Amino acid sequence: MLWSLIKILAFVAIVALAALGAGYLMEAEGGMQITAAGYEINLGPLQSVIALLVLVALIWIGFKLLGLLVAVIKFLNGDETAISRWFDRGRERRGYQALTEAMKALASGEGRKALTRAAKAEKLLGKPDLTNLLVAQAAEAAGDARKAEDAYKKLIRDPETKFIGIRGILRQRLSAGDTETARKLAEKALELKPQHAETQEVLLELQTKAHDWAGARRTLKARQRAGLLPREVYKRRDAVLALAEAMELEKSDPGSAVARDKAIEANKLSPDLVPAAVMAARAHIAMGSPRTAAKVIRKAWEAQPHPDLAAAFAEIAPDETPDQRIKRFGALAKIHPHHPETRLLMAELNVVAEDFPEARRALGDLAEKGGDARVYTLMAAIERGEGSPDTVVKGWLARALTAPRGPQWVCGKCHQINAEWGPVCEHCGAFDTLSWTTPPTPEAVSATSAQMLPLIVGALEERKAEEPAEEGAVVDVAPEPPEEGEAETDQESKEPTVAKAS
């Protein structure tokens, strides 16, 4: 409204100044005399000015007519668009000027101005493949999502700009949180441009979040064929996806042969992937191939000792005695004899076998170096087994209650701890970022250390209870467990990893 008022006032001012100037010219003396071909023309001051303006207009019209004559000659010589180009030349000039102004406004962050200039360029140029994209980007910058979507839909109608339109709507759906529609759009975009790196990455992320493991494997293969992934990285991530597929099949159909095959495939792709090795070993055990299962576990143990590997190794011979188990696990322990996990494993086995001096030797100096909850709990078990006073046992338990838990599944992207391994982080959704390591800021365990309490008060106290107590003798009582809520774990979690299999 204000701008319209300003334009009206400016027009009135110009008319007033022109009338004032004309009045001065009419009152002025002198003029201009033109003599040509025996004729003499005398013009006053006002008439002279008007004649000059008419002359300029005639010259401008002459140049335009000359240009039209050239266009007609070109048309007669076979250039079918020469005349139309001549008429559209001024329109195109204004259109490209508006397009330039729109691009400058968009680059400077002036969304509304860019949108206005882009709309003007769209009307003047008539080139939707060029102006629709600019309109869409300007609308996004101005916060007009609906207009931007309309512009992207126009781009989709043109085969040459279809990919650009789909990609634009894909970004909008991602911003709106509509991941299901975004996944379908990404699949469509990848069909149009299979080598497009950004679309492959977006689709892979959406597929893993949606647990579309089969689709994610196809996308991963496309990335590898495009040369965007080294072969080793591809094999590792393909193994993670195959394992995720196997785990999902196992949940829906326990004992499924397809799940076993997927687990074995994942282990072959990445033998050092601990969860894949565990699941593959159990698959081989179920198929009656304990030697193959042992080979799979030893291969993974070479890469990284892990308690889940020890648990799977124990399942190979579930009915063996504690001494037989120690002998069989000796071959596994020789691979990394000084690794903390190996020492903890052998200490647990010897505690179960009630060889407490050997268990102490297996632990070595782990407790003195600032161990975790498992180390201190095992020390409490050893002290209990050797008949140490309750104050000593309770001292180790107190340290276990406040000690860090040790290595856990930690996300390399958000550094959050995951309760168990998964193909994606349960906190940030990142794919294949979990590693078995000590958290940067170890958490205290409190209730979780109670998982090892049965090792102290379970088998040993049961053995003491079975022995007939002498009349009047005082029976040694185990220390009181933590308060209710701290030690609430199911019976299965109360048993130590290897002892449970025995």
Image (spheres, rainbow, N blue to C red):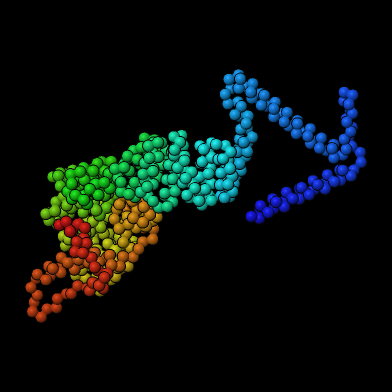
| Residue at screen point 27% across, 51% down | 305
Q: Is 441 placed above or below 185 here? A: below
Image location of residue 237, percent across then percent down: 33, 44
**Left or right of 251: which side holds 319?**
left
Image location of residue 452, percent across then percent down: 23, 64
| Residue at screen point 37% across, 47% down | 181
Image location of residue 80, percent across then percent down: 57, 24
Which residue occupies the extreme right position in the image?
A: 29
| Front residue of this view, candidates 40 and 161 | 40
| Front residue of this view, candidates 194 and 376 | 194
Residue 220 falls in image quadrant? top left
| Front residue of this view, candidates 447 and 344 | 447
**Left or right of 51: which side holds 359?**
left
Which residue occupies the extreme bottom position in the image?
A: 472
Q: Is 43 placed above or below 318 here? A: above
**Left or right of 272: which side holds 74?**
right
| Residue at screen point 31% across, 61% down | 405
- Is residue 64 visible in the rendered image? The answer is yes
- Is residue 272 visible in the rendered image? The answer is no
| Residue at screen point 33% across, 63% down | 404
Q: Quadrant of the C terminus?
A: bottom left
